[in-house]
Image (spheres, rainbow, N blue to C red):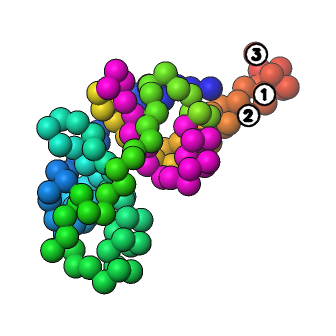
Amino acid sequence: MRSIKTLLEIKGGQAWSIAPQATVYDALQLMSDKDVGALLVVEHGKLVGIFTERDYARKLILKGRFSKDTAVRDLMTPDVLYIEPTNTIDDCMMLMTKNRIRHLPVMESGELVGIVTIGDVVKQIISDQESTIGHLEQYITGGY
């Protein structure tokens, strides 16, 4: 099973972030511009939270708040789970499934090195399975 480091090498380590004092409106605009479902909330170079579409839907809209008047820090999830580059795709999938999350920052020695989404993980699992099937078909048909 591949490591998260390998997955980041394939997909790239780009992770979009926003400051906690930014407005939710600004966060939504950035998420739309970058076509992402989550932003890492970074203050003074340190990861302090994550802001997701789910945070927006459950903590702003349903509570009657307004995105131009609300700071990201008021809605972000402050206790961020993360994974390390040495963990496997399976480790990542188990953590995401257990905690019902779709975005997982990747941290190495306290430094943010990327973010992995449930889509990235599923895509990699499917790719690995297709490769295994191809090798088995070659073995069975004597293609080796």
Mark 3 or mark 1, which is nearer the start of the sequence?
1
Residue 52 shows in this picture:
yes
Do labels 1 and 2 touch, CB within 8 Å? yes
Q: Which residue is drawn at 56% across and 28% down?
A: 88
- Please name whichever residue, 60 or 89, is drawn nearer the observer in this view of the structure: 60
Q: Residue 136 carries which label?
A: 1
Q: Check disc 3 and report its element: helix, strand or loop.
A: loop
Kindly identify the amino acid type of the residue bearing the numbered disc 3: Tyr
Q: Residue at x 85, y 25 (%)?
A: 140
Q: In this picture, which residue range is highlighted in magenta?
A: 92-110
Relative to 119, residue 1 above or below: above
Front tag of 1 and 3? 1
Do labels 1 and 3 touch, CB within 8 Å? no
Q: Residue 124's spot in the image, x, y percent?
A: 55, 38
Mark 3 or mark 2, which is nearer the start of the sequence?
2
- Please name whichever residue, 36 or 144, is drawn nearer the observer in this view of the structure: 36
Kindly identify the amino acid type of the residue bearing the numbered disc 1: Leu
Kindly identify the amino acid type of the residue bearing the numbered disc 2: Ile
Do labels 2 and 3 touch, CB within 8 Å? no
